[in-house]
């Protein structure tokens, strides 16, 4: 989401055709570039996400992480690329991601290490300050 910006690693950029059309439209745009058999779909506000969690999701696609409150985290899962492509609705704008992904019958994996803790408010970020004590870069 948003404009291109400097990155540490090479990145292929894409955007939904209609800016602001929602996560399903963004996912569809990304799928146009995917050549892998499995897509790991991640929100950008997951500073506690671990490699172990991503590995667990990738081992059993389709899979969605379930947070400690019992809620499916639809932007934290692994999905067969072919299944995602087949599940895309004809009208992408404002389509419900939950509805699209539920149809793929994912395995629900519990969050074992707090990976699903996201940052919804500025105060949430304080819980995720790295152990070095240094703040996250802006």
Image (cartoon, rainbow, N blue to C red):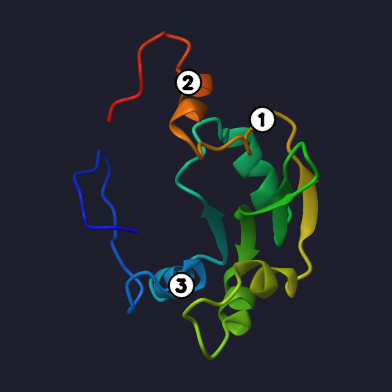
How far apart are the two marked residues, 3 and 2, measured between alpha carbons? 34 Å
Q: Which residue is mark 1?
A: 114
Give the Cα distance between marks 2 and 1. Answer: 15 Å
| Residue denoted by label 2 | 126
Q: Is residue 90 left or right of residue 135?
A: right
Callout 3 secondary element: helix
Q: Give the label, 3 or 2, closer to the camera.
A: 2
Q: Residues within 10 Å of mark 1 (few under 14, many from 20)?
A: some
Residue in the picture at 53% in, 21% down: 127
Mark 3 or mark 1, which has the lower sequence index? 3
Q: Nearer the viewer, mark 3 or mark 1?
A: 1
Residue 117: x, y in percent? 61, 34
For this rendering, which residue is in front, 22 or 83? 22
- What is the x, y in percent for residue 73? 66, 51
> Sequence-wise, which precedes: disc 3 or disc 2?
3
Left or right, 134 with respect to 112, comes to: left
Looking at the image, which residue is at 73% across and 72% down? Answer: 104
In the image, which is nearer the foreground, mark 2 or mark 1? 2
Q: Which part of the image, by quadrant, shows the C terminus?
A: top left
Left or right: residue 115 versus residue 13 is: right
Quadrant for residue 135, please give it: top left
Q: Residue at x 56, y 35 (%)?
A: 49
Q: What is the crowding at mark 2: few (fewer than 14 residues within 10 Å), some, or many (at least 20)?
A: few
Whole-angstrom CA distance, mark 3 to mark 1, is 28 Å
Question: Residue 95, located in which quarter of the rendered image?
Answer: bottom right
Characterize the local packing of mark 3: few (<14), some (14-19) or many (20 or more) Cα atoms within 10 angstroms. some
Residue 13 in the image, given as x and y percentages of width and height: 28, 62
SS for dot 1: loop
| Residue at the disc numbered 3 | 31
Q: Residue at x 72, y 41 (%)?
A: 67
């Amino acid at each position: 989401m948003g404009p291109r910006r400097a990155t540490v690693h090479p990145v292929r950029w894409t955007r939904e055709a209609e800016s602001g059309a929602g996560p399903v439209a963004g996912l569809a745009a990304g799928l146009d570039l995917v050549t892998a058999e499995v897509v790991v779909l991640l929100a950008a506000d997951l500073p506690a996400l671990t490699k172990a969690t991503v590995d667990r999701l990738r081992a059993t696609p389709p899979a969605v992480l379930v947070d400690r409150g019992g809620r499916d985290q639809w932007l934290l899962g692994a999905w067969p690329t072919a299944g995602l492509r087949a599940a895309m609705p004809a009208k992408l704008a404002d389509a419900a991601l939950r509805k699209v992904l539920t149809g793929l019958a994912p395995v629900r994996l519990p969050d074992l290490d707090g990976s699903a803790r996201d940052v919804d408010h500025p105060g949430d970020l304080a819980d995720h300050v790295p152990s070095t004590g240094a703040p996250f870069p802006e």
